[in-house]
Image: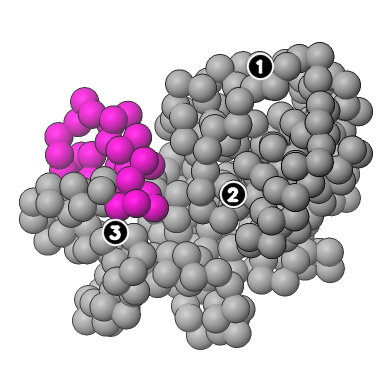
Amino acid sequence: LDQGSLLLAPKAVLETCDLLQRLLGSAAAEADGSSLKLIEITRAVNLRHLGFPALIPWPDPEWLHSWRRPLRLRILAHLVQSAADCDEQAELDYFERARGQLSAPGEESLEELILLGALGRALAAVRQYPDAAALLRRAVVGFVELGQPYQASHSFCELCRVQGILGSEDPLTASWMQGIATDPRSPAGQLSFLRLARGRSLLQLGRPELAAEQLDPRAIEHQWRLCPLHVQQSRGRWWALTLDRLGLPAEAERERESLSADTEFRLLAALDRCLRDEEDPGSILEELQQNQDVGYEIRRLRRLASAGTLEEQAWVVVAEYRY
C-alpha cells in the first residue's frame, strides 16, 4: 500500500467485492499519515466499482506530489471519476485541476492517457459532448499508437456513446474496435462491452442493420451470458430498440418483457415504448428519478436539459443514459 500497488492494479482487483473492503479496513486501523490517505482513496474507488459512488475529497497538494508521477496521475483519474459520478459542482473544479497535468497532444504517457479518458468521461457527464469526443479520441489514438489497444476499452466505449449522441462517427472507429477486441491482453468478457457500445452508437447513427450485427443475442452468446448483469440488460434494451427500427415490434416487445424488473432497464425500456407511442412520459421519468441506483444521473440529465419540454427531457434520458 505504501507504493500504491492497489491503485496501479487491474480494475478486477479493485472490484473484489467486500473482501477488499475488509482488508483495507484492517489496514487502515494500523496505518497513519500518507498510507492512511491512500487506503482511504482505494476504499472509495473500490466502493464506486461496487455501485456506491462517493466524492473523494481533493487531497493535500504536498501529499499528492509526494507520489511518483505515474501513481499521481492514477490518483487524479480516480478523483475526476468520483466527481463525475456524483457531484456536478466538484466535477468541473476537479477537471480544471487535473487537466493541467497533461502533456501536449502526442506526448502523453500511458498514465496520462488514463487520466485523459477520465477527463473525457467527465465532460460527457455534463453534456459537453464535442469537447468530450476530442479528449476521448485523443486517448484512444494514444493507446493504439503506444501498442496498448486493450487499455483503450473504457475510452473507446464512451467515445462510441458520445458519437452516437452527436450523430457523427470517426471513420477509424471500426478499426479501433477490431484492434481492441483482438488484443490478446484484453480481459475476458471485454468484447461484450465493445459490442454494446458500438451497437447502440450505430443504432443512434441510423444504421440498425449494422447495430443488429453487434447486439443480436445469438452473436457471442456465451459472452453475453458471462458479462455483468447491467451489460446484459442494457444490451436487451438496445436490441429491443433495434428490432423496433427493423420493423419487428412484436419481437421488440418480447425482448422488453424479458428485462429484469429489478433493474433500471425495464423502466428505460418502458420509456422507450412510451416515446415511440407518443404517450406522456411524466410518471416513468419520476419513477426513474426515485430509483436508488440511477436517480442521481437521471436528475442530472433532466436538469441539464431543463430548458426543454417534458418530452424533450425524456428523449435526452433515453438517448444519453450511460447504459
Q: Quadrant of residue 31?
A: top right
Q: Are the residues flagged by discs 1 and 3 in contact, CB closer than 8 Å?
A: no
Q: Position of residue 266 (x, y in %)?
A: 29, 66
Mark 1 residue type = Arg
Q: Which mark is residue 97?
A: 1
Q: Is residue 297 magenta?
A: yes
**How far apart are labels 3 and 2 at the CA level?**
25 Å
Q: Residues within 10 Å of mark 3 (few under 14, many from 20)?
A: many
Earlier in the chain: of badge 3 and badge 2, it is 2
Label 1 or label 3, whichever lies nearer to me, is 1
Earlier in the chain: of badge 1 and badge 3, it is 1
User: Which residue is disc 3 drawn over?
Assistant: 268
Is 71 left, or right, of 59 in this rendering?
right
- Which residues are drawn in magenta? 291-319
User: Which residue is disc 2 drawn over?
Assistant: 47
Q: Secondary structure at mark 1?
A: helix
- Compared with residue 245, is residue 204 higher up or lower down, i.e. above or below? above
